[in-house]
């Protein structure tokens, strides 16, 4: 590092120090001395520890002493700032005021602002329209120079602010506190963008050392004095707040002041060792140094020359000229190096970081607008070595792919970085981004907030529903929790491992418990570290770095330890089910993660779902959760929400797209949860990707919408509604079948059917309007309620489409008759059950060698169940065949119920005779059965066989229209073809007979039992 | 101004106008779970914690008083919008900027009952007061243009409270102009001059119970 130091080393021979004021008292100052060049570089403005400003010409004129003195301040001047135009000069002082002077006139213009405590720093914005001033007061004031009004006050520093620097792109203001904390503020929003806690050394306000910060003239890095021994200056990235590189090995004391040359190639630093060092930033080398008698407490580059003005703590000033050796580029020469290369060079020759700069980055860095327009290209990867120090500064993993594999430096510029596996995260958590608070978990029940206050942190749990009766007290966080999950019953926290002494810990807090001390914690083995946690109804789960899934009961019993397929990505719980997402393989080249997901039922010890998560191309998983109804769903970084459906053997529906729904482009949606019909997100304005804790996030509600194609119907909303509703209907019917409790769901199903039908009817209207009659017919077939069928027919006739209306009414009649026959079958079956029950015992002897249906053995009840199911399983068209005989059969059935022994076989023959016309082979089989066994059981058997075979037979022509099949054409239907009244009447009659029949069946059952 | 000093002369009192304004809809974020409320004016809810729902202002205030919700101030009550309106209001001396009809009352009610839900309450309040002052001044200066030839005054985008204040004055001024323009009417009016057209048929006013 010691190479390149040239002349002038070890003495102040190169710089002649002058007294600011001839004969002025040169007592040891307290470092409140400032110096600045005017815009032309012809004059120097300086202030010493007294309250006076001096204007000097440079090179020094023949007459000794300053050109002009301005003694407006009543105490020492602590800062000077020239407006960019050079027409005014601001000075701040320990006398609590900021004053503005005209230049070059030097007239006092105004007292810009006053503080209650001494002011330490002042800075002009790049446009000159704003002035920032700060000091020992609480808050940095941003003042408009036009009317001296206070635009903003940035509050957050816990120590006096000693330095301010405006970002050259006019977006940020960097401030440094005397405790070494650096903060970066957004000028437009007033929010804190980054906080670097204790990045710079601690300084004493009375010493002549000050934590000066300065933006690179292009604004991409911020130079901050280094805190660690031997590190002189650290450069932090503008956007991420991450450490980019550092300059080391020059000073023997901490750096207090620094100044960039105008082209950003050089930086001059002054430290407590009374040295000023000039650095070549591109090569990270110190070029030259100068030793002075006392510490230099102000540095200023000459705008138009190779010179640096310095002022020491004693109030002497001098100009180091020429400062940059002749063989190197001049400090104000910007033409030789285009910015992009400059920047890339800067990053490539990093000596302590492995960097990989993608091609995109240079593009994005050159123009601000480009960057805001395309946040996605703004991806870079880097491996931080000192993560323990700067890890907290990392922004959300959504916006960047952090942690790439370390790459060869030589390859860095040519090879695009490989996508990396995303880190484990908790759904509903936000990354700490410099603020005091961040969410560990935010869901529809409540929120868990981690709050960091002066080294001590605590965790707060809050319910959205404050009416729940109990308030959870805040908990002091001794473990340093980084993961949490909560539901209605309790919250679970986990901390990462911190060295040997404090292993990774999992802690569970129930919200209400009858027993005291029901909170428990588990210390994981030393080599294991918690990666994700989840909580559900009566269980707590944690996954660890060893790919173990550890399940605990609510009271802390260890229920299970399972091994996972890969490193965990995230997990979440809902009631008794747990969903775990794990990495299954390295990501695709486009960056799309390969994530495997499984859902376990922890109460039943079963695996419910297993499969891969279909992420959008190039995206990462950002949220995993359950809908209120308990459907697994996930959200990816491309803003697509997918829900798992049991249809199609367990598939995923893309039910929501953030890019389609967000109101404006710079808004991103942060997922919170979803119900059956709606999605709840928090809308975040760019550049934020995640909500802040305060003000409380407000949920935005969106309806689910499938990514449908613009069709010729011109009714996407309706089509979307139709698809979603039919999906929900299928979901509910599935559920009803699964729990075997149709009554509970019946009302819900009915309601859904009604809304679905309403939607279909509107679609039919749209189809008719567009003259898409085939579509209308197809849609009509999807109607489920009789009322809506009639409505459809009415609608079509009202739209003056008689042909369609006729077709629909024919279809309707078919449907009616078919349903009637289906019901008929059911009745027949129920009539049979009576017999079966009766005969089952004595028939058990006869059943040997005869097993037409295995269910027979289990007794009558399951048998009937099966018949029912076989009926409802959609042997739909088969029943059309039996239509002609309805009338007779009703009578027959009623007869049969009276004398069930003899008539039933006959009745049975009704369908079979008919079938004989079409399928003689089959009828023969039934015949054989009937002949073989003389008992009642065989009747049952034949019926079963008949029913099972029929759909087979019919399936050859499932869409056979009634008109094309004279056999199938119901005589009743032909009669009532034209008039709806007769049809209704016949229906009514049928219903009557049915009721009658049921009564009789019941009676007959009784009778049978008695006999 | 005529109506301002004597509330008996205006058609509505300020409290009555405020009462009318309470029917305006506003978004709230409840923090309790509650079923749909069936009111005469409509059904509101269901209320679920943290899910925004639109209710009338009176209901919002009632819930807020029981700290069952947060009120989301309407869009126009943001500093940016109000600054813009104030600027436009000052730039166009002849016309009024479109603001909600009950902006005075809504903002007043929100400041009274939901101050903690408003971001930058001081700034918003001072902006609103500035806007109101500018607009009232505009109304007053506009009244100077009333002359004998005026039979109607068109005031677009005027808010309820502003109308309420100037209504008695304008109506009566126009009536007077009309009468004095018409010689026939003057004769007739001689008999009827005493009768006050406005307050004649009004029963003694009941003061509204303050909330």
Image (tube, coloured by chain):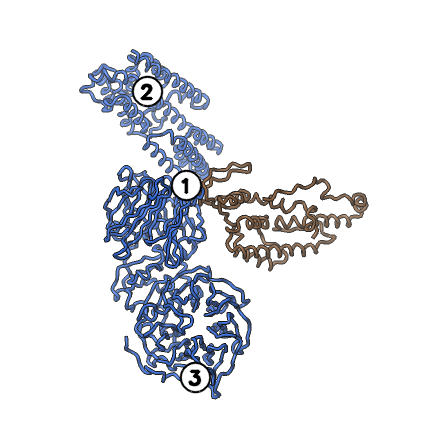
Relative placement, left or right, of B167 versus A262 is right
Q: Is residue A485 above or below residue A347?
A: above
Q: Are marks 3 and 2 in contact (CB under 8 Å)?
A: no
Q: Position of residue A142 (x, y in %)?
A: 49, 65
Q: Color of chain B here?
A: brown
Q: Secondary structure at mark 2?
A: helix
Tag in front: 3 or 2:
3
Q: Nearer the viewer, residue A526 or A562?
A: A526
Res. A677 mark: 1
Total number of numbered discs in the rendering: 3
Q: Position of residue A696 (x, y in %)?
A: 44, 51
Relative placement, left or right, of A356 versus A815 is left
Q: Residues within 10 Å of mark 1 (few under 14, many from 20)?
A: some
Q: Which residue is mark 2?
A: A830
Q: Earlier in the sequence, mark 3 or mark 2?
A: 3
Asked whether residue A243 is in view, the answer is: yes
Write down which chain is painted blue: A
Asked whether residue B170 is in view, the answer is: no
Q: Earlier in the sequence, mark 1 or mark 2?
A: 1
Q: Secondary structure at mark 1?
A: loop
Q: Position of residue B96 (x, y in %)?
A: 61, 54
Q: Which residue is mark 3?
A: A18
């Amino acid at each position: 590092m010691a190479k390149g130091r040239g002349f002038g080393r070890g003495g102040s021979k190169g710089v002649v120090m002058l007294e600011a004021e001839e004969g002025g008292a040169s007592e040891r100052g307290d470092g409140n001395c400032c110096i600045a060049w005017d815009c032309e570089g012809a004059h120097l403005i300086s202030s010493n520890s007294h309250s006076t400003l001096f204007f000097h010409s440079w090179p020094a004129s023949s007459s000794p002493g300053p050109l002009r003195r301005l003694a407006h301040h009543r105490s020492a001047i602590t800062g000077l700032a020239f407006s960019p135009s050079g027409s005014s000069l601001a000075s701040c002082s320990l006398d609590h005021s900021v004053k503005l002077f005209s230049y070059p006139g030097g007239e006092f213009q105004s007292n810009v602002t006053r503080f209650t405590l001494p002011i330490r720093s002042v800075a002009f914005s790049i446009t000159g329209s704003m002035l920032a001033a700060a000091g020992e007061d609480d808050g940095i004031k941003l003042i408009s120079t036009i009317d001296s009004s206070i635009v903003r006050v940035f509050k957050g520093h816990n120590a006096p602010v000693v330095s301010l620097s405006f970002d050259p792109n006019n977006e940020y203001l960097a401030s440094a506190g005397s405790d070494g904390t650096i903060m970066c503020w957004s000028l437009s929003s007033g929010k804190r963008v980054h906080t670097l806690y204790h990045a710079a050394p601690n300084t004493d306000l009375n010493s002549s050392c000050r934590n000066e910060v300065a933006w690179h003239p292009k604004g991409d890095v911020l130079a901050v004095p280094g805190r660690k021994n031997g590190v002189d200056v650290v450069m932090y990235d503008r956007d991420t707040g991450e450490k980019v590189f550092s300059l080391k090995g020059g000073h023997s004391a901490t750096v207090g002041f620094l100044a960039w040359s105008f082209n950003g190639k050089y930086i001059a630093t002054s430290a407590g060792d009374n040295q000023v060092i000039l650095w070549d930033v591109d090569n990270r080398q110190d070029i030259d140094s100068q030793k002075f008698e006392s510490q230099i407490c102000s540095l200023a580059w000459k705008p138009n020359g190779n010179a640096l003005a310095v002022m020491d703590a004693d109030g002497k000033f001098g100009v180091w000229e020429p400062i940059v050796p002749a063989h190197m580029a001049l400090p104000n020469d910007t033409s030789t190096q285009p910015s992009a290369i400059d920047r890339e060079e800067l990053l490539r020759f990093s000596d302590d970081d492995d960097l990989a700069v993608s091609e995109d980055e240079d593009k994005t860095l050159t123009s601000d607008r480009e960057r805001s327009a395309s946040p996605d290209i703004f991806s870079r990867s880097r491996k931080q070595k000192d993560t323990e120090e700067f890890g907290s500064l990392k922004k959300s993993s959504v916006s960047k792919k952090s942690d790439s594999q370390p790459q060869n430096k030589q390859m860095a510029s040519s090879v695009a970085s490989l996508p990396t596996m995303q880190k484990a995260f908790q759904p509903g958590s936000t990354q700490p981004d410099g603020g005091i608070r961040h969410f560990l978990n935010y869901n529809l029940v409540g929120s868990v907030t981690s709050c960091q206050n002066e080294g001590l942190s605590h965790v707060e749990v809050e319910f959205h529903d404050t009416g729940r009766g109990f308030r959870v007290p805040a908990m002091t966080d001794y473990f340093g929790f980084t993961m949490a999950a909560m539901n209605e019953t309790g919250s679970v926290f986990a901390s990462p491992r911190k060295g040997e002494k404090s292993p990774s810990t999992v802690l569970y807090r129930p919200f209400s418990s009858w027993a005291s001390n029901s909170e428990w914690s588990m210390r994981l083995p030393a080599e294991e570290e918690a990666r994700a946690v989840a909580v559900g109804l009566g269980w707590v789960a944690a996954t660890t770095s060893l790919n173990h899934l550890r399940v605990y009961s609510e009271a802390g019993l260890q229920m299970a330890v399972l091994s996972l397929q890969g490193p965990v990505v995230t997990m979440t719980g809902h009631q008794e089910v747990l969903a775990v997402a794990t990495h299954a393989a390295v990501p695709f080249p486009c960056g799309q993660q390969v994530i495997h997901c499984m859902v376990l039922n922890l109460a039943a010890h079963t695996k419910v779902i297993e499969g891969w998560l279909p992420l959008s191309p190039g995206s990462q998983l950002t949220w995993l959760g359950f809908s209120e109804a308990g459907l697994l769903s996930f959200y990816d970084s491309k803003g697509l929400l997918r829900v798992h459906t049991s249809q199609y053997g367990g598939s995923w529906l893309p039910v929501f797209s953030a890019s389609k729904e967000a109101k404006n482009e710079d808004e991103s949606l942060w997922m919170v949860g979803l119900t059956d019909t709606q999605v709840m997100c928090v809308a975040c304005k760019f550049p934020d990707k995640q909500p802040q804790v305060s003000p409380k996030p407000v949920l935005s509600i969106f309806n689910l919408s499938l990514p449908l194609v613009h069709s010729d119907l011109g009714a996407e909303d309706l089509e979307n509604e139709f698809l979603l509703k039919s999906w929900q209907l299928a979901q509910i019917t599935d559920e009803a079948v699964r729990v075997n409790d149709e009554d509970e769901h019946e009302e819900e199903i009915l309601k859904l059917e009604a809304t679905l039908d309403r939607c279909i009817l509107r679609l039919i209207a749209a189809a008719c309007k567009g003259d898409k009659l085939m579509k209308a017919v197809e849609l009509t077939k999807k109607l489920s309620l009789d009322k809506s069928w009639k409505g459809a027919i009415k609608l079509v006739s009202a739209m003056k489409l008689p042909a369609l209306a006729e077709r629909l009414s024919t279809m309707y009649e078919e449907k009616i008759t078919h349903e009637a026959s289906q019901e008929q079958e059911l009745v027949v079956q129920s009539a049979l059950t009576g017999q079966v029950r009766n005969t089952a015992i004595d028939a058990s002897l006869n059943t040997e060698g005869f097993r037409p249906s295995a269910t027979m053995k289990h007794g009558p009840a399951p048998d009937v169940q099966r018949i029912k199911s076989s009926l409802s399983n959609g042997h739909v068209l088969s029943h059309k065949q039996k239509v002609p005989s309805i009338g007779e059969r009703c009578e027959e059935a009623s007869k049969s119920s009276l004398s069930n022994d003899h008539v039933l076989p006959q009745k049975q023959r009704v369908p079979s005779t008919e079938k004989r016309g079409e399928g003689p082979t089959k009828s023969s089989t039934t015949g054989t059965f009937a002949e073989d066994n003389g008992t009642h059981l065989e009747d049952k058997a034949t019926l079963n066989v008949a029913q099972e075979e029929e759909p087979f037979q019919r399936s050859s022509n499932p869409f056979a229209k009634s008109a094309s099949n004279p056999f199938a054409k119901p005589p009743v239907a032909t009669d009532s073809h034209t008039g709806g009244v007769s049809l209704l009447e016949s229906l009514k009659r049928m219903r009557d007979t049915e009721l009658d029949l049921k009564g009789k069946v019941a009676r007959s059952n009784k009778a049978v039992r008695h006999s | 101004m005529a109506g301002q000093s004597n509330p008996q002369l205006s058609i509505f009192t300020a409290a009555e106008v405020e009462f009318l304004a309470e029917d305006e809809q506003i978004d709230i974020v409840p923090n309790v779970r509650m079923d749909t409320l069936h009111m005469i004016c409509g059904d509101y809810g269901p209320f679920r914690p943290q899910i925004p729902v639109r209710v009338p202002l009176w209901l919002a205030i009632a819930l807020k008083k029981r700290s069952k919700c947060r009120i989301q101030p309407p869009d126009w009550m943001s500093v940016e919008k109000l600054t813009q309106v104030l600027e436009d209001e000052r730039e166009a001396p002849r016309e009024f900027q479109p603001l909600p009809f009950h902006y005075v009352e809504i903002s007043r009610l929100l400041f009274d009952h939901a101050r903690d839900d408003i971001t930058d309450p001081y700034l918003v309040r001072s902006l609103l007061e500035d806007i109101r002052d500018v607009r009232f001044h505009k109304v007053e200066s506009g009244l100077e243009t009333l002359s004998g030839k005026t039979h109607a005054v068109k005031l677009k985008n005027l808010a309820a409270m502003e109308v309420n204040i100037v209504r008695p004055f304008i109506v009566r001024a126009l009536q007077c102009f009309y009468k004095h323009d018409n010689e026939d009417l003057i004769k007739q009016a001689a008999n009827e001059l005493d009768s006050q057209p406005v307050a004649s048929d009004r029963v003694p006013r009941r003061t509204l119970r303050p909330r």
